[in-house]
Amino acid sequence: MNKISCIVAGPRGKMGSEALRMIEKDDTLELAACIDRKHEGERVQDIDGLPSMGAIIYTDAEICMQEVEADVLIDLTTPEYGYKHTKLALENGIRPVVGTTGFSDDQLSELRQLAETKQLGAVIAPNFAVGAVLMMQFSKWASKHFPDVEIIEKHHDQKLDAPSGTAAKTAQLIQEEREEHKQGHENEKETIEGARGANYDGMRIHSVRLPGLVAHQEVIFGGLGQTLTIKHDSYHRESFMSGVKLAATEVMNLDVLVYGLEHLLD
Ligand SMILES: NC(=O)C1=CN([C@@H]2O[C@H](COP(=O)(O)OP(=O)(O)OC[C@H]3O[C@@H](n4cnc5c(N)ncnc54)[C@H](OP(=O)(O)O)[C@@H]3O)[C@@H](O)[C@H]2O)C=CC1
Ligand SMILES: O=C(O)C1=N[C@H](C(=O)O)C[C@H](O)C1
């Protein structure tokens, strides 16, 4: 069986380097090339801290995607470049698997449309950890019975986007499930701006950023005389890798863009 050949964008990053280690050990995936901001023309194995892999690094994403024969782009970069890389991949017949968070709704719609026009599979997943996907699904279900809900997400202090992609996706899933609902006191006033967090359709999202954290989320539901808390913790970035592999495998059988790993799980 042919291996699925992958380009990884962001190979020196916390997630990108973990993805390289996963691909190195995997029998079904292989690394075709990397896209980085530095190290043009060098090999992955020549970069400190990266696995011993011979793939070449490109700093120009367009040239990379035109020159390298690859099935899948795995993007783990920044919102700005992740969006550009995803678009380029679709334009060059390469299926994107995107973990990068922080895309706007308009960007997601545009990419969905492009994938449809090209009839090319794409997976954009704000969280590749199976436990986090279940946490989001359980939260969606719970909101049917407990419409009063707040989300607390906690991440390492190097994270660029807030709220996290996972929190935004959780809020969207809850919005789809619960009836139209106003929560909290109608005369509530913040005496310090931002005290009540971000407002997504009346749901509050609180973003904590601290060294020592990896990726954590609690969804708290309040009812009469009770609360329900649904919580997930990623303590290590290995937690995301079975999801990255699943997406890189399943994207080969898709001809549309799917948003969220839940679409690929039984
Ligand atoms: N879906 C999921 O399950 C998960 C998603 N994420 C998301 O993945 C993304 C990356 O996270 P993380 O690894 O923690 O972040 P890091 O900052 O550790 O890594 C990002 C990497 O991308 C590189 N980069 C920046 N611009 C470019 C470019 N133009 N071309 C190629 N590489 C570039 C950075 O280089 P430099 O250091 O030089 O700036 C850096 O090495 C974030 O959006 C995060 O939210 C994170 C964890 C899980
Ligand atoms: O930046 C991170 O670290 C993470 N980002 C994703 C998000 O924004 O939800 C997934 C996970 O929470 C880790």
Image (cartoon, rainbow, N blue to C red):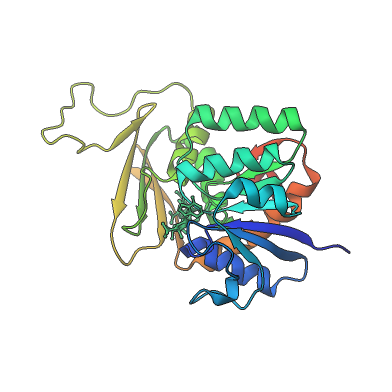
Quarter occupied by residue 27: bottom right
Quadrant of the rendering where the N terminus is positioned: bottom right
x, y percent for residue 110: 59, 28
Q: Is residue 214 above or below residue 21?
A: above
> Which residue is depicted at the point 74% across and 54% down?
70
> Which residue is depicted at the point 75% across and 59% down?
5
Left or right of 66 in this view: 210: left
x, y percent for residue 172: 49, 33
> Which residue is depicted at the point 51% across and 61% down?
15
Q: Nearer the viewer, residue 66 or 171?
A: 66
Q: Nearer the viewer, residue 231 or 86?
A: 86
Q: Is residue 213 above or below residue 54?
A: above
> Which residue is depicted at the point 47% across and 68% down?
236
x, y percent for residue 182: 35, 23
Q: Is residue 258 above or below residue 10?
A: above
Is residue 142 visible in the rendered image? The answer is: no
Q: Is residue 232 above or below residue 85?
A: below
